[in-house]
Amino acid sequence: MQDYKKLEIWHKAMDYAVEIYKLSARLPSMEKYGLTAQIRRAVCSISLNIAEGAGCESYKEFRLFLEYAHRSTHEVLTILELIERLKLCEDKYIPDLLQKGKEIRAMIHAFIKKL
């Protein structure tokens, strides 16, 4: 259907995943199998679902995968807020990561509406 590598939202999601991975590497080791693993799975799910959806045969099916990606952004944002509230990582970039996640979520939502 579409080449996912031509989609701006896929590139933004990939860049976001790299940033989240860097943040999660600074979480306490006790979170290795908890929040670290969870946020990494969730952030990867965004770009993976965009790519998988781009390979679908119909817009209806593509939309379903975009909805999964949209939900994953909610998951990442919630985990970031939890990390911040628990003070697990004194990272000055968390507000920036929250903003970028909200922008990606809005882009995905707009893309869904466009389809």
Image (tube, helix red, strand yellow):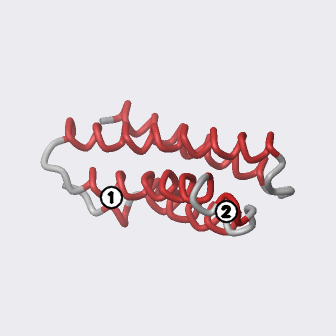
Marks 1 and 2: CB-CB under 8 Å?
no
- In this picture, residue 64 sits left or right of residue 10: left
Disc 1 marks which residue?
Answer: 51
Residue located farthest toward the top when viewing the structure as drawn: 113
Give the mark nearest the N terminus, 1 or 2: 2
Q: Residue 60: image x %, image y %?
A: 20, 35
Q: Is residue 32 positioned above or below 63 on the image?
A: below
Bin the neighbour count of mark 1 within 10 Å (Cα to Cα): few under 14, some 14-19, many 20 and up: many
Q: Residue at x 40, y 39 (%)?
A: 111
- In this picture, residue 44 sits left or right of residue 114: right
Tell me the quadrant of the picture where the C terminus can be found.
top left
Q: Residue at x 35, y 52 (%)?
A: 49
Q: In this rendering, which labeled residue sits more in front, label 1 or label 2?
A: 2
Q: Residue 96: image x %, image y %?
A: 76, 51
Bin the neighbour count of mark 2 within 10 Å (Cα to Cα): few under 14, some 14-19, many 20 and up: many
Q: Residue at x 25, y 44 (%)?
A: 62
Q: Residue 7: image x %, image y %?
A: 39, 58
- Name the amino acid type tagged 1: Ala
Residue 101, label in figure = none
Res 29 quadrant in image: bottom right
| Foreground residue among 7 and 60 | 60
Report the label total: 2
- Name the amino acid type tagged 2: Ser
Res 108 quadrant in image: top left
| Foreground residue among 81 and 105 | 81
Which secondary structure lies at badge 1?
helix
Residue 24, label in figure = 2
Res 40 quadrant in image: bottom right
Tell me the quadrant of the picture where the N terminus can be found.
bottom left
Mark 1 vs mark 2, CA separation in Å: 23 Å
Q: Residue at x 79, y 45 (%)?
A: 84
Q: Residue 44: image x %, image y %?
A: 46, 59
